[in-house]
Amino acid sequence: MLKSKLRKKVLKIRKTAYKNNLKIDFNKVFDLIKKNNLNKKSIGGYFPVNYEVDDLEILNQFDKKNYQVSLPVIKKNFQMDYYKWSFFDPMKINQYGIPEPNSKKIVYPDIILIPLVAFDNNLNRLGYGGGYYDRVIEKLSRKKKILKIGLAFSVQKINNVPVTKYDKKLDYIVTDKYIL
């Protein structure tokens, strides 16, 4: 099945899961970080839109534990960087209607939380098709080792995500039912 058709199908399923109040136990994310001995204190999240798993609660917990929290800002040429953000900082709305930090301080997070449209057992992810996360993972990975954690509802799992040489695998996927 083409990525665009898959996307459309799974986005409907995700919307239903979201409206049914499926939740992720974010303690699982903290456990993964401990398990990976990540004492570094920098995490990149995302501002949830379009029925994505809401990571704002866990970002707030990280903020309280003195992690440096950052969110992505979309740039030209399908590029994206993370910028420092806290819950009290003003935000601006980007061309896709997504709130972004108004900060000027670029951050290279040690851990990134990534929203998914779909995923498979091989830790492949299907996103919206712009390649923003694939590019930022490539860029950050050249600077240092990062932990890539996808957040999704278990109903977003499909048998096989079609992948290209540009697609980047995740290290973990945390869902409402299990961790891959």
Image (cartoon, helix red, strand yellow):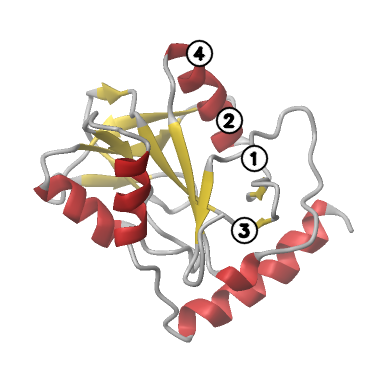
Q: Which residue is mark 3?
A: 117
Left or right of 160 in this view: 87 = left
Residue 36, x across and y down, in percent = 37, 36
Measure the alpha-carbon separation of dots 3 and 4.
25 Å
Measure the alpha-carbon separation of dots 1 and 4.
20 Å
Residue 127, x across and y down, in percent = 63, 49
Contact, CB < 8 Å: mark 3 with mark 1? no
Q: Which residue is mark 4?
A: 142
Q: Which residue is mark 1?
A: 130
Q: Can you say whether 72 is above or below 25 in the image?
A: above
Contact, CB < 8 Å: mark 3 with mark 4? no
- Name the foreground residue: 170 vs 16: 170
At horizontal 74% and vertical 70% (from top left) the residue drawn is: 9
Contact, CB < 8 Å: mark 2 with mark 1? yes
Measure the alpha-carbon separation of dots 3 and 1.
12 Å
Q: Can you say whether 9 is above or below 127 in the image?
A: below
Q: Which residue is mark 2?
A: 78
Give the class, few, some or many, for how many residues have Cα within 10 Å of label 2's Cα (few <14, many ≥20): few
Residue 154, x across and y down, in percent = 58, 70
- Name the foreground residue: 50 vs 39: 39
Kindly tell me whether residue 45 is visible in this rendering.
no
Q: Which amino acid lies under the numbered mark 4 shown in the image of this protein?
A: Arg
Measure the alpha-carbon separation of dots 2 and 4.
18 Å
